[in-house]
Image (tube, rainbow, N blue to C red):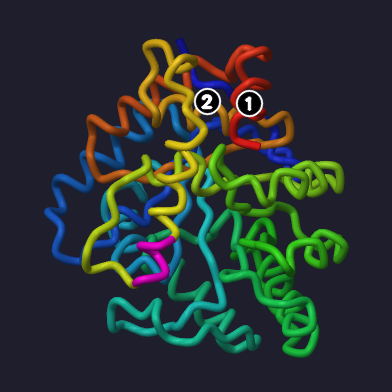
Amino acid sequence: MSLPTATLGRTGETVTKLGFGAMEVRDPQADEREVAALLNQVLDAGVNLIDTSPDYAASEMHIGRAISHRRDEFFLATKCGCPVGDDLPRATLPHVFTPENIRAAVEQSLRRMNTDHVDLVQFHISPSRETLEDEGSVEALAALRDEGKVRFLGMSGTLPNLPDHIAMGVFDAFQIPYSAVERDHEQLITDAANAGAGTIIRGGVARGLSVPDREMPERFRQSIEARRERYASADVSDLIGDMTPQALLLRFTISHPDMHTTIVGTKNPEHFAANVAAAEQGPLPDDLYQEVKRRFA
């Protein structure tokens, strides 16, 4: 079997419907051999989209060390607006969407990932249209595209700003949160695709319904607990068959008719292999998909 694919909107790029989210390989102290083995496993499995960010600590540097020699095998996406600098991590610092910071972030990403171009650069944390227009942010990213350092412009967008982002008509792809237990953006995925943009789904397996870490910020713990409660209250035990809950969630996400790829992260090679096996099964049968949607309504 092989992974299903889709065309990523107006980019024209063919991407596997399972992508890899590299946030989970952000640890600066991680064993470089283990990280390299995992990232090469991703490419060997046929996954051809990798998403990262300057906010993800050492993630970009691990990519540069481990798989830059295989650069022509994958579509590479990162973010901008993030804090720039050598100190890690920096994701808790304010995001800035000035032309200077956008250029600095892209130049830093190119150095860290040992590449001369990034396929897709996405504005991080869903800045408002007003912020983007006041700062000249889109124009700054477009200038980097004209220089050949960026191929496509993207937005990692959420409500309430995502409808404005789609209406701007300037973004080639959108990264949107969505899963069976978080369906707030379900229609907006269709709206983005109908506007000609690529759709990249994050959170498609709801982090595997993981038990929240006690050291997590409270808002993250609450979000995870809410997802676990929604999954339990829907009671799909009679529908799941021989699938794991994570496989059901992944295949549910892939079943959305207007999603093009979903990025799923892990640092566990066995978990990654299980994700590939689930994705290779493709979308859920339509009657099962509709019933799962009904129960999670």
Distance (Cα) linking label 1 and label 2? 6 Å
- Binning the other alpha carbons within 10 Å of mark 2 as few (below 14), some (14 to 19) or many (20 upward) gives many
The residue indicated by pointer 1 is 255
Instruction: Tell me if label 1 and label 2 are in contact, CB under 8 Å.
Output: yes
Q: Position of residue 173 (x, y in %)?
A: 70, 52
Q: Position of residue 70 (x, y in %)?
A: 38, 41
As drawn, the label of residue 251 is 2
Which residue lies at the image location 58% right of the left edge and 37% below the top edge?
261
Which residue lies at the image location 64% right of the left edge and 88% below the top edge?
98
Q: Position of residue 48 (x, y in %)?
A: 49, 36
Q: Is residue 36 above or below residue 247?
A: below
- Answer whether residue 219 is magenta in the image: yes
SS state under label 2 = helix
- Answer whether residue 148 is magenta in the image: no
- Residues 159 and 50: in front is 159
- Residues 193 and 255: in front is 255
Q: Is residue 36 above or below residue 28?
A: above
Residue interval drawn in magenta: 218-222
Q: Amino acid at mark 2?
A: Arg
Does residue 145 appear in the picture of this structure?
yes
Q: Amino acid at mark 1?
A: Ser
Q: Position of residue 123 (x, y in %)?
A: 62, 69
Magenta: main secondary structure equals helix
Which residue lies at the image location 49% right of the left edge and 43% below the top edge?
230
What is the quadrant of residue 208 in the picture? top left
SS state under label 1 = helix
Q: Is residue 181 toward the left or the right of residue 211 in the image?
A: right
